Image (cartoon, rainbow, N blue to C red):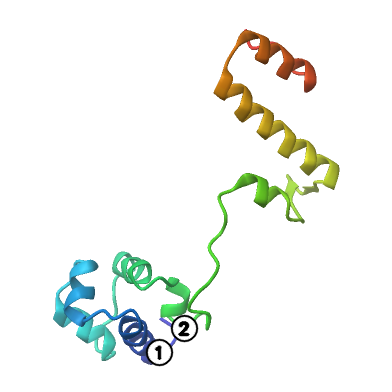
Amino acid sequence: MQNPEQFGDRVRLLRKKLHYTQKSLSEHVEIPKSTLAGYENNIRTPKFKTLEKLAEALNTSTDYLIGMSDDPQPSKPTKDLKKLLQSDNYHIDGKRLSNEDLEFAIKFLEKLVKSENTNTDNNDTEFSNEFNLKSKQ
């Protein structure tokens, strides 16, 4: 850990901000209360799995807890492919994707989901024709 003094302070600060007692947080991350107290007093350092559990329980990142980041509320990456593809600087094997490529990918995925949800032979043919795909046989 880069700055152990910060770790205990940050755990204590977030624990209190979220209205956890040492007992309730220690139960939540499945460690003894005395172990959590040791972390907060900078006497002990957690194993990686415990660090991950603490970060999750305290709604922060492991980077923040260990002092690698000063942002206690980092944004979480989106799992919405449409939103992801609408941002820029994406590439495949080092080749940057153009806006047209990204728009095509979005339309393709939307049609694929729609086709899978209705799942008829006619839809498969329309889908294959629209995107110049070989038949699924």
Q: Counting residues from the N terminus, which is met first, the one under dot 1 or under dot 2?
A: 1
Question: Which secondary structure lies at badge 1?
Answer: helix
Q: CA distance from mark 1 to mark 2?
A: 6 Å
Residue 18 is left or right of residue 70, and the answer is left
- Can residue 50 be seen here? The reply is yes
Residue 126 is left or right of residue 119, and the answer is right
Residue 107 is left or right of residue 48, and the answer is right
Residue 9 position within the rendered picture, expressed as x and y whole percent measured from the top left: 35, 90
Residue 95 position within the rendered picture, expressed as x and y whole percent measured from the top left: 80, 46
Rendered residue at 35%/84% (across/down): 17
In this figure, which residue is indicated by the disc labeled 2? 67
Examine the rendered structure and indicate whether residue 75 appears above or below residue 34: above
Q: Amino acid at mark 1?
A: Gln
Labels in figure, total:
2
Q: Amino acid at mark 2?
A: Gly
Question: Which secondary structure lies at badge 2?
Answer: loop
In this figure, which residue is indicated by the disc labeled 1? 6
Residue 122 position within the rendered picture, expressed as x and y whole percent measured from the top left: 67, 9
| Tags 1 and 2 touching, CB below 8 Å | yes
Rendered residue at 85%/42% (across/down): 100
Res 46 quadrant in image: bottom left
